[in-house]
Amino acid sequence: MKKTFLALSLMTFSQLSNAVSIHYQTRELKGVIKTSVPLEQVQAQMGCVFENTSGNLIDTRVSPTTRIIKMNEGEYQLIIKGGSYREILPSYQLVSCHYKFIVLGRTLTGKAVLEDVFVMGSDRERMEANELEIFRNKNAVSEKLESLINPLEVF
């Protein structure tokens, strides 16, 4: 029984020692969105993409609560609750991380407009190690975001 427990413990430890681990969090953020299209909804999203040795990708995401309040024509206040992203994956490598807004608006003719606005990083392209470094610093993402969303222009 003790040998089985020891073997399982060693196996788990060896897997975790080869695991990629990432954790970043954001404070509540407030900013302004300027747009020529009336907005209906905005959703913040933070996440990362991982790849194993076989080339399989895993894309994980977290969506903090996001609200918009119309201030003037073409100008909205953006309020994003604090969020936390954490992932530990054995035998995977970190490929990319992102913080983006999924923006839904409607043109004057009533046509829906949907756009991914990447504020930081990417979920489509492989990022260099130095580009990923900010996502490895637990609190650096908040600091960078505050400077990027005042104001954020879309459409």
Image (cartoon, grey):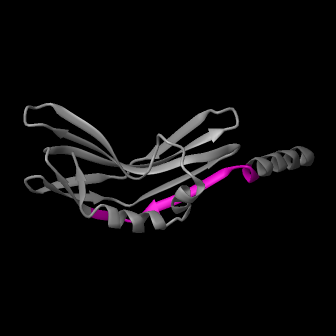
Q: Is residue 118 left or right of residue 130?
A: left
Q: Which residues are magenta?
A: 16-30
Point 87% across, 50% down: residue? 6
Residue 94, percent from left and from top: 60, 48
Point 87% across, 46% down: residue? 7
Residue 83, percent from left and from top: 42, 57
- Observer-nearest of 7 and 23: 23
Q: Quadrant of the N terminus?
A: top right
Instruction: Report the label total.
Output: 0
Q: Please say whether residue 28 is visible from this viewpoint.
A: no
Q: Is residue 66 above or below residue 136?
A: above
- Observer-nearest of 85 and 137: 137
Residue 137, percent from left and from top: 54, 65
Q: Is residue 67 left or right of residue 69?
A: right
Question: Quick check: is 28 in the magenta stretch?
Answer: yes
Point 40% across, 65% down: residue? 144
Question: Quick check: is 144 in the magenta stretch?
Answer: no
Q: Is residue 82 above or below residue 105?
A: below
Q: Is residue 138 left or right of residue 68?
A: right
Point 52% across, 59% down: residue? 135
